[in-house]
Amino acid sequence: MYVWGRTPTATRGRVVVQQKSTSRWKTLAVLTSDRAGIFRRTFTTVPRGDVRARLAGTSDLSLPFSLRAVPDHIYIPFGGIPLEPPKKKDG
C-alpha cells in the first residue's frame, strides 16, 4: 500500500498513519513531511480496514479511505465525443 498526502498547512510536520482494526485505529507509522508538508511511504499491510492520517499533536484528521481497488471510469472532458472503452484482454 502506497500512501501520500500533505499537511493541512503545507508545512513540515509529523503525521501518524493509522489503519482501522476492528473497533480501534492502529498506528502503522509516524512520518515526517518535507518542508512543503508532503509525506509518503509504502506499507506492507492487509488491505482490510480504512486508513487515515492524523497530524501529530493536533486533532486534524484526514477522511478515512478504503484500500479496495476502484474500477476504472471513463470521463468525457469538455463535452467531447465519447470514446470506446478499452477492450479487455482475454486470459
Image (cartoon, rainbow, N blue to C red):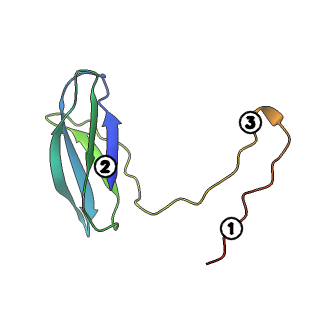
Q: Position of residue 5 (x, y in %)?
A: 34, 37
| Element at label 3 | helix
Q: Which residue is mark 2?
A: 52
Say what amino acid the circle numbered 1 marks: Lys
Q: Tell me the mark number nearer the camera, choosing from 2 and 1.
A: 1
Q: Secondary structure at mark 2?
A: strand
C-alpha span from label 3 to label 1: 23 Å
User: Who's the residue at 25% across and 66% down the image?
Assistant: 23
Nearer-N-terminus badge (3/1): 3
Q: Is residue 29 left or right of residue 68?
A: left
Residue 48 shown left or right of residue 68 in the figure: left
Q: Nearer the viewer, mark 3 or mark 1?
A: 1
**Residue at left offset 34%, top offset 68%:** 48
Q: Residue flagged by tag 2: what amino acid is it?
A: Arg
Please state the horizontal and vertical placement of residue 42, each as a whole percent of the image: 27, 51
Q: Which residue is mark 1?
A: 88
Residue annotated with mark 3: 77
Q: Which mark is residue 38?
A: none
Q: Examine the image and state in which quarter residue 6 appears.
A: top left
Residue ID at (81%, 48%): 83
- Image point 18% across, 28% down: which residue? 13
Cα separation, mark 2 vs mark 3, equals 31 Å
Disc 1 on helix, strand or loop? loop
